[in-house]
Amino acid sequence: MFSLQDLLGAQQGNEAVDQISGQVGAEPSLVNTAIQAALPAILGGLASNASTPQGAQSLDNALSNDHDGSILGNLGGLGSLIFDQATPTPRQADAGGILGHILGGNQNQVAQDVSQKSGLGMGQVAQILMMLAPIVMGYLGQQKQQQNVGADGLGGMLGGILGNAIGGGQAAAAPSSGNPMMDMASSMLDSDRDGSALDDIASMAFNYITKK
């Protein structure tokens, strides 16, 4: 299964898992299971967005303007950035907005699937998804800079990462048409996405926090 350690490297991946585990109050092993179930859906949603010229340009703009990878150097403060309602949330940590654009109307579907696979409650899964989304976007922004990738290259970059996530380490070839990526994304996101920035996940996460 594809994990944050696979995406970020062992040291940074372990740090991220520890921070997420502390935030949700669950064992790292269960949180890792949830992350491994959620990452293909998040990457699949991004690949689906990047499969059209308009979607790829929109993602490129977001990565260029809001996600330079610096958030990966502040994993210890990620929970406060996202969940501290007393201070404005920076765009790079706007987890609800990011998930809305990535998953659209599939947010609840993905959360339920992750909950069933991990055994964690929906409130805990909601927090995990909200912390994962900025991490993934920060990683993609970092890779975009390092590889000097523009909007037209995001599909291939995501196709390789998604291939690793689905195939257990066997990267997918960068497609020219985007259709293979759409097939992979559709296997995880099989209902229509409306692209709206819904607040379902954020509501579940904040409700869970207030009840702790």
Image (cartoon, rainbow, N blue to C red):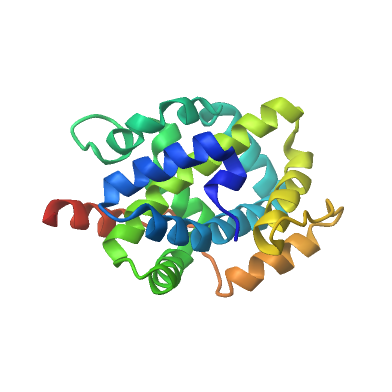
Left or right of 9 on screen, residue 71: left
Q: Looking at the image, how many numbered discs can be counted on the residues?
A: 0
- Whether residue 123 is visible here, answered yes or no, is yes
- Residue drawn at (68%, 32%) of the image: 144
Q: Is 11 in front, or is 80?
A: 11
Q: Is residue 144 above or below residue 161?
A: above
- Residue drawn at (47%, 41%) of the image: 14
Q: Is residue 95 above or below residue 116?
A: above
Tell me the quarter of the picture where residue 26 sits.
Answer: bottom left
Q: Is 26 in front, or is 208?
A: 26
Location of residue 183 in the rendering, given as x and y in whole percent from the top left corner: 73, 68
Location of residue 25 in the rendering, given as x and y in whole percent from the top left corner: 25, 52
- Residue drawn at (73%, 57%) of the image: 163
Location of residue 22 in the rendering, given as x and y in whole percent from the top left corner: 29, 45
Left or right of 137 on screen, residue 159: right
Location of residue 167 in the rendering, given as x and y in whole percent from the top left corner: 71, 63
